[in-house]
Image: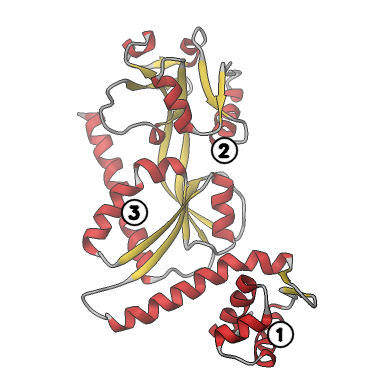
Amino acid sequence: MSINCEILDLRAFLSVVELENFHRSAEALNLSQPALSRRIQKLELAIGAPLLERTTRHVSTTALGAELIPLVRRMLEEFDTSLFAVRDVGSQRTGLVTIACLPTAAFYFLPTVIKQFSAEYPNIRFRILDLPATDGLQAVARGEVEFGINIMGFSDPDLVFDRLIEDPFVLAARKDHPLAAKSELEWDDLAPYQLITVHRSSGNRTLLDAALAKSNLKLRWSYEVTHLSTSLGLVEAGLGISVLPKLATPQEEHPFLVTRPIRNPEISRTIGIVRRRGGTLSPAAERFMTMLIGTWAEGNSATKERAVG
């Protein structure tokens, strides 16, 4: 089913939302108030439901209208960006890429790929929503972003997941901690020490607890935090050890911290690209996603070669 609406209908809706007034919005758009009202009515007819609630003094959005705001903003910005791109056909290659990304991947992995991409396409801009797993999936489903980098483990039939990498859970400890002397560990080795974990609301914690329960194992924690970066700060301060995904740890040599693999069982999270089923990407997003997949594949190959060597 197609929805028949014009760009000006969307601009009219967003203007009324932002100014909360039909009269001011009509002036800003250089329209008469009846013409503005017809634009809104046309959009509501196309959507099939009211988007605005009107009183004599105030205009507010309905629940559906509020849900549409971020999608309309992105559509208008992409449209405006495309218009400017027409002027720069050829060597300039402009565009906007909007993605939702797990904070761990956004902090350590994503900047490397963006730097490589920007060297080839310097005029393409990025909007990155660094969101927890559930929020990131919702952003993709609502169309607020073109695609996301997330954990596999959902069952939304409207979303497609393309696997990128297995990200193992590892121990993070100070270099002077007794466990740092071991090349690899088992889960029972952690028991005598104070453990720092993330809250149960975290997708990483849920995944880890479920995997350990299958082996009749359970972590006993001394400190519980909201963000993985906070747990690393506590580890660095010498308050304990932490178990977290490898991507959430420093990828280069760190002056105080080390990571160690944990076996029996080895637990990992599957990270990949999430897209709306049947959705299309802008040319800029398509190019970036291709580079993202290629770079991650190269990183996996290099890791395997080092392991073999």
Q: How many marks?
A: 3
Label 2, on which residue?
203
Tell me which amino acid carries mark 3: Leu
Q: Secondary structure at mark 3?
A: helix
The correct choice, above or below, for 62 with respect to 39 in the image is above
Residue 266 seen from this side: no
Residue that appears at 51% across and 47% down: 131
Label 1, on which residue?
41
- Name the side, left or right, on which 216 lies relative to 145: right
- Which label is found at residue 292? 3
The correct choice, above or below, for 182 with respect to 208 in the image is above
| Quarter of the C terminus within the rendering | top left
Residue that appears at 22% across and 32% down: 306
| Quarter of the N terminus within the rendering | bottom right
Q: Residue 202 location in percent, x, y?
A: 57, 36
| Mark 2 to mark 3 CA distance (whole Å) | 23 Å
Q: Residue 302 location in percent, x, y?
A: 24, 39
For the residues bearing labels 1 and 2, Cβ distance under 8 angstroms:
no
For the residues bearing labels 2 and 3, Cβ distance under 8 angstroms:
no
